Image (cartoon, rainbow, N blue to C red):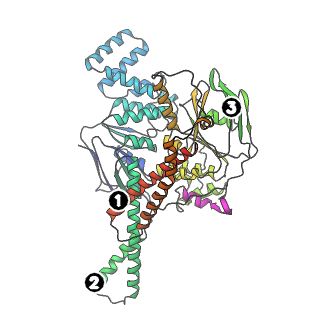
Amino acid sequence: MNYLTLENISKSYGDKVLFENINLTIGKGQKIALIARNGSGKTSLLRLIAGEESVDGSSARILIAKGIRIGYLKQEPEFDPQMSVLEAALDSDNESIQAIKAYESATLKEDTEEIQKWSSKLEDLKAWDIEVRVKEILGKLNIKDLTQIVSTLSGGQQKRLALAKMLIDEPDFYILDEPTNHLDIDMIEWLEKYLSSKNLTLFMITHDRYFLERVCNEMVELDGTQLHTYRGNYSDYLEKKAARIINEKTVLDKTKRLYKKELDWIRRQPKARGTKAKSRVDKFDTIKEAAHKEGDSQLAPIEIDSSRLGSKIIEVKDISKAFDDVNIIQNFTYKFKKRERVGIAGANGVGKSTLIQLLTQEIKPDTGRVVLGETVVFGHYTQSNLDIRGDKRVIDVIRDIADYIPLKKGMKLSAEALLERFLFPREQQQVHVSKLSGGEKRRLHLITVLIKNPNFLILDEPTNDLDILTLNVMEDYLMTFPGCLLIVSHDRYFMDKLVDHIFVMKGNGQIKDFNGTYSEYKESVKAEQKEKGNTPSKIEKPKTTVTEETEVRKLSYFEKKEFNEIEGLIKKLEQEKEKIETQFSDTSITPEKITEMSIRLGEIRNEIEEKENRWLELSEFA
């Protein structure tokens, strides 16, 4: 059964065309993610489907199956500000939910007569399982004070409340705009399991790539003004998109050669032409347009020459911090080293931002001290610091700070080139800031931090409201960043890719320094709980350090054999990779063959990465 059908859908704002004559069908049970750059029309498309915006053109049609209920999670939720949290969460015309609402309200008021009345009603409706679901969902999303008035909630709390309301209501068709924003990692992992384990129909925008991988079974990418559909999860999307780009590049190369040939023919022809010649001339314009299309280009990595960082960076000496009776940090000591890449993980409200403020000396510890090295230059990206004047052009915002970033070997990366790298083409650099989308403004704010050329970069939730394409660009940039990197993020994929150890803020002032990625930490917690029979321990045993392990750990006979063979295997894979890449220049190969080669190329790259990681792992003990 088709829940949604889009036919010939177009949308423009002035001269800006977001999408043009796109078609899409969503059937029952499909879980589809929409991928596109910020400002390209993702949210506009969701608003069209939800009936909050009108389409362009008389031939456009949006068909929604009769009788299905749609739930729409917006980026900015709308509630009656005078409602209580409970009233807002249970604001539904569903009879069972209305009964739950009345029962919970009576319970809060301790009205025995009303409790009995609605208890009987719930029995009649067989709706007690709904009450269990309501309490589970509210609890998992850390919504505790059900009497609090909605107007007193923060933006993040209202987003969580809106998500809870939708999950409680259980619509037939979920439309979700960035559902993981403002959730901590535990909440995201719970929501991931909730959505993936149920036979739901959903269409969503999210930048969380692990979430995409585990929840969705189809990706739809809005590229230019058109939609491209990819069956499968996020890994399948990456593989199939790479094949599409290679195929398009091959076709573009062929078209350019044909254009050159036709251009030579036209220049040689006399003015008087026959019917066949005129037909060929008419086709020339079509070939010319196709030949001048721009394909996706891979940017070469850049080597930033950040300001010199001395041997003393940040030394944290036995610091503690509390607010009233709440311990945030207790007796924490750490010494940062050059090129450290540290993540900070923990539940919302546990004190991650406070730790950053202590490190940057914005606030002082109650006891202990933080010593900064003289050469430290902070670059601090925060969610709240978006104070950019709307009447300024994008390029002027960056040039007012600096004209370029210095690179290695005396090279420079201009402000224009940096903006282009972060997906602001030259024409958009002339646009005023007030015309940018929310995600584009965040991307611009990030560039204002990078152009200052810091040597200690602090990123506080940098992935919120940024699209996946921007995240890939940012990750590539940060992979080559030569200074220290400190990241607070709920994006597990982002953390796993960029940090090599994390500070886990466990609450009550306790900070655990874990040597590894976030995913490795979670696996270690699971293994620890399994070993202890799922009984959480109040006191954790200190983790054995890498140094201690290397003193006693030796390679076994089979590990030595594997270590000696890996280099040869990597060399063979590199040779096969080179051979395939060379074959792509052959213009006679078919699109099917190109797809087959692209898939194999992706497999080879993964094998090389796995074997290189294994080699590094074994080399520690060789």
Nearer-N-terminus badge (1/3):
3
Determine which residue is flagged by label 3: 333
Residue in front for this viewpoint, 173 or 107? 173
> Which amino acid type is shown beneath numbered disc 3?
Thr
Q: Is label 1 or label 3 in front? A: 1
Identify the residue at image location x=55%, y=58%: 421
User: Who's the residue at 55% across and 47% down the image?
Assistant: 616
Residue 357 drawn at (x, y percent): 66, 36
Residue assigned mark 2: 276
Of marks 2 and 1, which one's residue comes earlier in the chain?
Answer: 2
Where the C terminus falls, by quadrant?
top right
Please provide percent x and percent y for residue 399: 64, 57
Based on the displayed image, in which of its 4 quarters is residue 356 positioned? Answer: top right
| Quadrant of image for the N terminus | top left
Mark 2 or 3: in front is 3
Amino acid found under the numbered disc labelled 2? Lys
Q: Is residue 614 above or below residue 89?
A: below
Give the structural element (helix, strand or loop) at label 2.
Answer: helix
Q: Position of residue 244 (x, y in %)?
A: 38, 59
Q: Which residues are magenta?
A: 407-423
At mark 1, the secondary structure is helix
Q: Residue at x 52, y 32 (%)?
A: 154
Give the alpha-carbon distance from disc 2 to disc 1, as whole Å.
39 Å
Please tell me whether residue 420 belongs to the stretch shown in magenta.
Answer: yes
Q: Are marks 2 and 1 in contact (CB under 8 Å)?
A: no
Q: What residue sits right under mark 1 in the picture?
A: 596
